[in-house]
Amino acid sequence: MIAQSEGYTDLAMEERERFQGTEKEISGVVVEELKEKRADMKVTKVEINTPEAAAVMKKPMGIYITLEAEELSEESDQSDLFAEILADYIERLIPKQTKRILAVGLGNREMTADALGPNTVNQLWITRHYSKQGEGLSSVIPGVMAKTGMETATIIKGITQETKPELIIVIDALAARSANRLGTTIQLTDTGIQPGSGVGNHRDGINQESLGIPVIAIGIPTVVKTESILKDSWNYMKHQLMEKEQTKELGQKMQELTQEEWKEVAATVQKAGCMYVMPRDMDERVVRLSHILSEGINLAVHSRKFMRI
């Protein structure tokens, strides 16, 4: 039988799902579904508490909160409500007494699937320049290494040393394992981020270890690997065949496919090289999603008494 896909994902929740339906328990991982009554939204909290669990989950130790809703990237009158809900969960991750926050929009604004971070930061309410003490919200869009010749982490480290923020909020586009999560899932984490890791372009980490201050990362999946789409389609076809008596036997044969046999099937896609794809309307989705993220950050940051100018 085919095991859960082990393709890369930025989502801790998807990494945890890889072990569902198996006898393997992950010690040191706590999963909690949080109640959200204000909207049709599923909220899941994953805590990775030990180095051993981090190794199994392929994610740093820390808290990961995911907000899932089909209407997130659609034209909806609930956008403001989604932003309010997001703000509440962002506030949970902001340390008390934080007065200076730097927002960083990662990604290439000229590429649709990678423009989420820059588009979000462009809509933030920047207030640091109103304060003589440097308190409030500042922001930067550092661009990509191909255009700057510098590691993004190096640019952020220099700004951090000069402006002395107490917290960094990083916004970036993510990679998912399931196409169903594209544009429908927001992940928040207090572990920072590894830019480019989702598409195999590993860069220096942006986290508390490298910068010396807490880093909150907020992201939404915008791309998925072609192999993942093949697996999703295969599983859908398998379930459809098994529901009908005349095709049930064929569905069962698909169900019994071994991991090695699946690799042979997937190899037909992999021959074209490692490819990532996005929905054809992702440009419109990024506009709507960046608005929700920016409003959520604005509400979380500026609703705090010390941030009001």
Image (cartoon, helix red, strand yellow):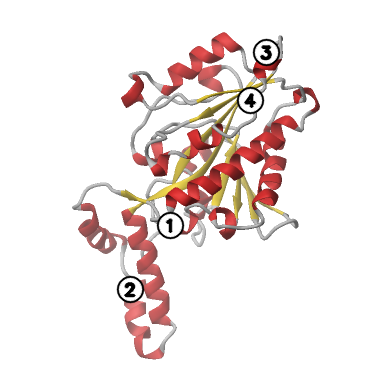
Relative image position of residue 302 (x, y in whole percent): 73, 30
Q: Disc 1 marks which residue?
A: 179
Q: Quadrant of the N terminus?
A: bottom left
Label 1 and label 3: CA atoms lie apart by 42 Å
Q: Disc 2 marks which residue?
A: 254
Q: Disc 3 marks which residue?
A: 134
Determine the residue positioned at 41% across, 24% down. 204
Task: Name the residue type under label 4.
Answer: Ile
Give the secondary structure at mark 4: loop
In front: 61, or 298? 298
Between disc 4 and disc 2, whose residue precedes?
Answer: 4
Determine the residue positioned at 40% across, 48% down. 223
Between disc 3 and disc 2, whose residue precedes?
Answer: 3
Badge 3 crowding class, 10 Å Cα cut-off, few under 14, some 14 to 19, many 20 or more, is some
Q: Give residue 132's mark.
A: none
Label 1 and label 2: CA atoms lie apart by 21 Å
Label 4 and label 1: CA atoms lie apart by 34 Å
Give the secondary structure at mark 1: helix
Picture quadrant where residue 239 is located: bottom left
Relative image position of residue 283 (x, y in whole percent): 43, 48
Q: Disc 4 marks which residue?
A: 126
Between disc 1 and disc 3, whose residue precedes?
Answer: 3
Label 3 and label 2: CA atoms lie apart by 61 Å
Picture quadrant where residue 136 is located: top right
